[in-house]
Image (cartoon, rainbow, N blue to C red):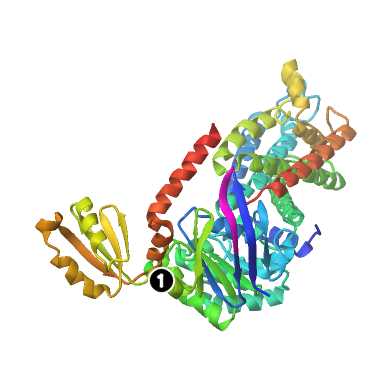
Amino acid sequence: MPAISVENLTKVFNGLRAVDNISFEVKEGELFGLLGPNGAGKTTTLNMLATLIRPTSGKALISGFDVLKEREEVRRSIGMVFQEPALDNYLTGRENLEFHGIMYGLSRKEAKERVKEALKIVELEEFADKLVQTYSGGMKRRLEIARALVHQPKVLFLDEPTLGLDAQTRRRIWEYIKKLNKEKGVTISLTTHYMEEADFLADRVAIIDFGKIVALDTPENLKNILGGDVISIEVDNWQNAKKVFEKLTWVKKINHENGIFYLQVEKGEEKIPLLIKIDEKEAGFKIKSINLRKPTLEDVFLHFTGKTIREREASQRERFRERAKRHRR
Amino acid sequence: MEINFTAIYILWLREMKRFLRSWSRMVSMLMMPLFFLIFLGFGFKGAFFPGIGYTKDYLHFLVPGVIAMALVSTSTIAGLSVLWDREFGFLKEIMVAPVSRVSIIIGRIVGGITTSIIQAILILIISIGMGFSFLSFPSLLLAILIMVLISSGFIGLGLIFASIIRDIQGFGLITQLIIMPLIFLSGAFFPLKNLPKFLKYLSYLNPLTYGIEGLRRLLIGFSFLPFWLDFIVLLSFSFLSVILGSYLFEKSEI
């Protein structure tokens, strides 16, 4: 039985298809990533899987339980870490976790033991009896991950687990997530708009854009689809440059954006000298800068959607604003 | 939808811990009723007002009103505190737990009633220090029952407001536009007889009027309205507002 199975799941808000007919399966013990820009529908998907909002149509099973018909069983099987902290600041770290344990039906004794164990995993024992309002952002996130473990869920949902954290803390959270997955065997499904996060953590990644899954595979396979490296090259006259680049037989694909060309090539390090040899006068443009990159998931996203994730976020915001305006009228 | 008593207990315990840890909040909530009690109570000590219909001094007339005033503001805020939990995200943690919404609401209401009654009793103790004397202990216990009804009714009302306004910006508006007029239109500080007809009728639509009347009957042995009427109105008010408040809360998606 798959840990998560999603079939044609759809959510419509005010006529906007926030999640549009998506299907996927997550195997037991897998670390699955939903990657996409803000507003792509990742959180909505997670909230539907966690029974917090009702799907407009479609079906989803968690450990075999239906998110519409068996809500309490689903809730018992999952742990959830929300995008924004969901802690009570007037309680201590330990109290927050014990509250959680008892809400999930543990006895006081059991709750106390499990809380101790969970706090140890995220190395917060020292601060356990301080009020949460004194915690830093990273500590809060760690506390929430610990909390989600107290009732020993089969599936752990993490919504943007490192959003707003500094690089060092992010690394640490990544280590915890990996450890939980590998050592405790917890199935984890996380959303993120950080490419490197999905790349580093996930066994498989679903790329989601405008509520649809546009690609789903291991990060390795996704990057291989691009068939090679990316040379990004900034020029002063892009029309002329485009003509020249299009004639180069070893360029597999050209993307152009904000005066920067992204050329897909094999063995990029050998192609840079060729590009530099292009005669400026004859070609009618100058190279301002040149950069070689091995493909990342960012490129994969660009490949499937024709936009970078940041650009997509901007247009997504516009789309929502436009919607909201129309809706108000 | 089963009722989960451990969940209710832990939700109640959370309210108690929060209450005991935020003294400043409690003090600021009790400030207004205490001002009224102290300044009006001492200021008009021994004064006799027309229409007061009662032989003892103004302080005795005032105390049940001030207790009700404290109950109304603390209870409405207890209901509205859903908004804080929503703002700070904790509501999601509660909503995603495998606990029926009914248990969540009962936990919140029981917690709110407890903290409100504690504050009402604090006011009562202070007023006894100022020279107030209540009828008897059995009638005090009945008065606490009336306080529970007032409190649960206004917690329900708070829940209703919380689901309508949905963000904490509307909070001040509620206290300014709803709670204060309700208190002034309830005969807490003066006999309603003295009001012009139009305002008097309005005050008879105010459930708090009946709460204060009921408290007066039980605490000082005097009221303008019959006690059975007070009781029935209060009971139906708190029943209806709790049902409607719970229904709206249950319907809401995070």
Q: Which sits in the foreground, B38 or A209?
A: A209
Q: Which residue in the protein does label 1 denote?
A: A223
Magenta stretch containing residue B94, yes or no? no
Residue drawn at the location 88% of the way across and 30% of the way down? B226
Q: Is residue A191 visible?
A: yes
* Chain letter, disc 1 residue: A
Secondary structure of the residue carrying numbered label 1:
helix
Of the pair A283 and B150, the residue shown nearer to us: A283
Q: Amino acid at mark 1?
A: Lys
| The C terminus of chain A - image quarter | top right
Q: Residue furthest bottom?
A: A183
Q: Which stretch did the figure color magenta?
A: A14-23
Residue shown at 48% from the left, 65% from the top: A135
Task: Tell me what residue is drawn at x 38 percent, y 57 percent.
Answer: A308
Residue B165, x across and y down, in percent: 61, 39
Q: Position of residue B154 (x, y in %)?
A: 72, 41
Name the spot of residue B134 as percent of width and height, x first: 80, 41
The vertical placement of A155 against A15, above or below, is: below
Q: Which residue is rendered at x = 47% and y = 41% of the image?
A: A321
**Left or right: where does residue A270 sit relative to residue B40?**
left
